[in-house]
Image (cartoon, grey):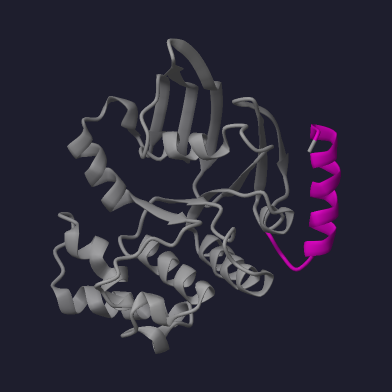
Amino acid sequence: MNILEVRNLCKSYNVNGCQNNILENVNFNISKGEMVAIMGPSGSGKSTLLYSVSGLDSVTSGEVKIGNKNIVKMKEKELANLRLDDIGFIFQQMYMLKNLTITDNIILPAVQSKKNNENRNEILQRGHALMRKLGIMEIADNDINEVSGGQLQRACICRSMINNPKIIFADEPTGALNRTSSDEVMEELTKLNDNGTTIMLVTHDVKVAAKCTRVMYIVDGNIKGEHNLGKYKIDSQKRERALNNWLMEMGW
């Protein structure tokens, strides 16, 4: 079953009267339970692709289906509800509201969701369960400036999961972290994926991509190739070597 289907996706901008094509006729599927990494040189269109297929940015032409819903044809209010209810987001810059505690930031999407019939206490219990799972219960009542970068990113993962999304989109989720925190965050994302959560992420880090089930390589707005790694186990060095060799063939 495909969670994400992308057909003939194009994205262009007009700059000083000239058309600048960022994505050209992109086609791919992501199946339920996959964890797919998007890699490529700087300026190749990685983040634009993620923003376009997740409904955060409009597309010029083509079709993007999340579940069985074509988001390209949606009006903004319908699209906003889809992003809130069915999609989780994790960004390199860990956006959270400064006037709320970590817990309140995590449960905010569930409080705002119209599909949710739970009361605040029930939502709070689910939020705490996620925080315990990711090992950050001790910072529940902290402000966002009272925690480490790794803790804050794990809180962002909790927030992305609070509405039980069909898919999580992550743009460089470890890009602002040191290696130890990066490894901890990726361990949590692989656990989520092992439990059935579908994830699409953009990364420049081979160690991160090697933990994914599949890697797609994009150059000049086109997917040049893809490499299937299978489910992540313990053999990280072997996977990294295989991925590095393939990336070199792609021109990395």
Residue stretch rendered in magenta on the structure:
232-251
Q: Is residue 68 left or right of residue 207?
A: left
**Above or below for 229 versus 14:** below
Q: Position of residue 158 (x, y in %)?
A: 40, 69
What quarter of the picture does the C terminus occupy?
top right
At 86% from the left and 44% from the top, the residue drawn is 245
At 47% from the left and 32% from the top, the residue drawn is 5
Q: Position of residue 145 (x, y in %)?
A: 39, 77
Q: Residue furthest bottom?
A: 138
Q: Is residue 192 left or right of residue 179?
A: left
- Report how many numbered discs are placed on residues in the image: 0
At 66% from the left and 45% from the top, the residue drawn is 214
Magenta segment main secondary structure: helix
From the viewer's side, name the closer residue of 175 and 52.
175
Q: Is residue 123 left or right of residue 216?
A: left
Task: Name which quarter of the figure residue 188 lies in.
Answer: bottom right
Q: Position of residue 30 (x, y in %)?
A: 53, 40
From the viewer's side, name the closer residue of 57 and 239.
57
**Above or below for 65 versus 183:** above
Task: Name which quarter of the figure residue 164 lies in.
Answer: bottom left
From the viewer's side, name the closer residue of 166 and 55.
55
At 51% from the left and 17% from the top, the residue drawn is 20
Task: Name which quarter of the figure residue 139 lies in.
Answer: bottom left
